[in-house]
Image (tube, rainbow, N blue to C red):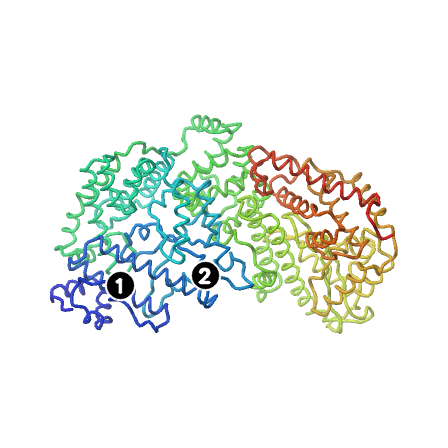
Amino acid sequence: MQFLPDFLERVRAGSPFLSTLIDREADCLNRIDSFDIDVLAAAVADPDMPLARRLRIERRRVALLVALGDLAGAYDLTRVTRTLSDFADHALHRAILQAIEERTPGAEPVGFAAIALGKQGSHELNYSSDIDPILLYDPAILPRREKDSPAEAAVRIGKRAVELLQARDGDGYVLRVDLRLRPSPEATPIALPVDAAVSYYESAALPWERAAFIRARAVAGDVALGRRFLDAIRPFVWRRALDYGAIGEIRDITRRIREHYAQGQAFGPGYDLKRGRGGIREVEFFAQVHQLVHGGRDADLRAPATRDALAALAAGGRIAAEEAALMDAAYTLFRTIEHRLQMVDDRQTHSLPDHGEALDRVARLHGVEDGGALLDLLAPHVAAVGAIYDRLDGAQTSRLPVDPQSLADRLEAMGFASGEQGARRIADWRGGAYPALRSPAARAALEDSLPGLVAGLATAADPHAALMRLDAMLARLPSAINLFRLLEAQPALARLLSTILCHAPTLAEALARRAVLLDALIDARALEPVGSVDELVAEMRERAGDGYERLLDHVRDVVNEKRFMLGVQIVAGTSDPLAVAAGYARVAEAAVRVLAAATVDEFAQRHGHVPGSELIVLALGRLGGGALTHASDLDLIYCFTGDFAAESDGEKPLGAVLYYNRLAQRLTAALSVQTASGPLYEVDTRLRPSGAQGPLVVSLAGFERYQREDAWTWEHMALARARPIVGSATGQAEAAEIIARVLGGDRPPRDIAAEAATMRADMARHKPPSGPLDAKLAPGGLVDLEFAVHVTQLATGRGLAPQLGAAIDVLAGEGLLPDTLRPAHDFLTRLLVTMRLVAPDGQVPSDATQPILAAALGCADWPAALARLDEVRQIVATTWAAIATGEQDGDR
């Protein structure tokens, strides 16, 4: 295509980016006769190229052709944004298909969809913009590898698709992808199961989240799946009742934008076309507010594109035709100039240059004389939009009163028992009582986030106690400004923090002790399941080269963060407490493995190794069974292989028995002593041979002899959940064989049921339940269930799995235990794990907390949870009574 010299000169002078593309894509331009073309077809690259490179080349060609057509006046704003959006749809679709093909070659690309929100969803994409999709999958039909769960497969497909689009090389990039518009992005994986997403938008979505779906399209992947999702949530986006909640939130967003981007509010050089007063965002919000008010009853108003919405609102008599015309003209000009800004260097910028030469360059690129002329062109439109938006009713601040008495009255009205005490504490914060609150910026951020935080704290059974937990956290923060800005910008995170402070005293106390745990909440992966033991071991070993003491601190940092976030998953309702219990156990096992290896190496520097010998660590109790709680200690037995009479070969040799006893003491200290990074685990070694009276470590041969000849029934019951977790493969296999032989019957004959019944009765006398919801010690609780399972295991030699659930499945399958016992076990375990967080004293939680506990138990409400608890306890009590009284067969 031949261009007029003055046009090319204007383009080259105004945009280094376009100038480079004109030179690189000369062949592409020479193939084009006019602007009356299908830009996407003209931009097609060699289909034999790798997809990522092909898309990058096509993207730059689209960028060049659209820009030239725009600057030449051949393309209006609608065609520019539509073309850019169509390319984004195409690129995202191809990236998803490629990601699926790479993981499951030949599979039909179904079950994974992308919903475009924002400007892509309304076909209004910027010249240099990111895209804001929500990724959904259908677990029933998603292609996946045999080893992958649907959730794992979906996340990997999503990550790969994003990588294909965002990766940069000499050809540039395809698209920037922002996935933060999905529900609770700080708490959810990047791809969501479609049914769960529908449920969220039906019941839990905030007004602004529903409003985002005004501009939503199914654009990529399994588009039919995406459309079904949008059809399902449509009634919850468009409410027939006036949605003043959404209106208030949108207005509040505008207020916060004006405050946060103060430098870009004043019109002139540096003005922010997007966020500035009277700018693009206010045109969009003006249209959306009216759509939300009236769109539930009038489907004609549901146009996704901003200018289409303005026209529909005017046609329907919802806004004045003059207002619509002014807003339309302003929006068209703002977006056009915004594109000029982004053409200069292909940067996602919205602000006018703040100095003359750069502003003049943008002005000339647009075709006006200089920066002053450009400002004159924009000024009346900015003023008109600002005035129209300001006329919207109800734009009121939601800040808390500063006057102490007014604040106290407000707090008491919200449910605080002593408004005066709360007001004094908030006044301390406002006065900079803590280092994190002493800068003006921090206090300004505090003011913005206070209304939401205090409203959340007011939902607690004791709002003042929740407020004091927040106070303890603030006292330990080195800086608070980023936290407050984050809480203000991400309401879901503010709600999550309030939930922790109000309903999970265990987690709130952890935050008060170590405010650094807040960083874990910010990580978008925080609420994903923790990895495998091997993956956790690798993460904990990252600091192994920095010395033993640094490793101890690092392991504590990792464990405390993982343990905290696992607890948060329960109170946030994102994970099954059974899965969390397994995660707790994997974290603990990884810590034991890492610290055992490091302690052995550190100890050997002075004392060497015992030839032909090694340390074996057995996990028992809840760790052995692979299901810990937040507060569980670790039941461990230390053994060693080889000759007990051997001696170590180090600089200071020790006999094997002394060597391993000192080594085990070091390992226990490594696991339990508090360092600067906090505590780790309490270690309980009383299940070792001869209990507290016996040596800390025995040889594996001595352990076997004790178990075969001297151990009591209760010790064999404990052995039923024993498994080796430290040692070579050979050493662990040897230990496992000993355990299997003993449990299989190589032990003294005893009246197992009678001895167990006596022991359980003694426990009941000396360790009564801590409260009415004590899931362990109450009659029909987990202790009774464990006794029933272990007695049956020992009596029959069947179901000898250390995991209680797996053992019950085998025993029930063979008719040795009732089928109802596995659901009872799962319910009680969920109760135990959750109660450790929300009511560790075993008492009935507050009315406000009861729904959280009921949801964790899989019950519709609190009365249903109590009814199910009674039913479960009856099942367990009946089962245990039958075994304890000898009504079932036993090993006599």
Residue flagged by tag 1: what amino acid is it? Leu
**Residue 278: image location, x then y, percent:** 24, 42
Find disc 1 in the rendering and name its residue: 40
Badge 1 local density, few (<14 within 10 Å), some, or many (20+)?
A: some
**Residue 58: image location, x then y, percent:** 29, 66
Picture residue at 20% right of the left edge, 69% below the top = 29
Residue at disc 2, secondary structure: helix
- Closest to the observer: 841 or 66? 66
- Closest to the observer: 312 or 447? 312
Residue 695, placed above or below residue 49: above
Badge 2 local density, few (<14 within 10 Å), some, or many (20+)?
A: many
**Residue 739: image location, x then y, percent:** 77, 61
- Label 2 to label 1: alpha-carbon separation: 25 Å
Q: Is residue 398 left or right of residue 382?
A: right
Residue at disc 1, secondary structure: helix
Find disc 2 in the rendering and name its residue: 157
Res. 659 mark:
none
- Closest to the observer: 846 or 341? 846
**Residue 552: image location, x then y, percent:** 62, 59
Residue flagged by tag 2: what amino acid is it? Ile
Picture residue at 11% right of the left edge, 64% below the top = 6
Q: Is residue 330 left or right of residue 192?
A: left
Q: Of the residues under marks 2 and 1, which one precedes in the sequence? A: 1
- Closest to the observer: 87 or 266? 87
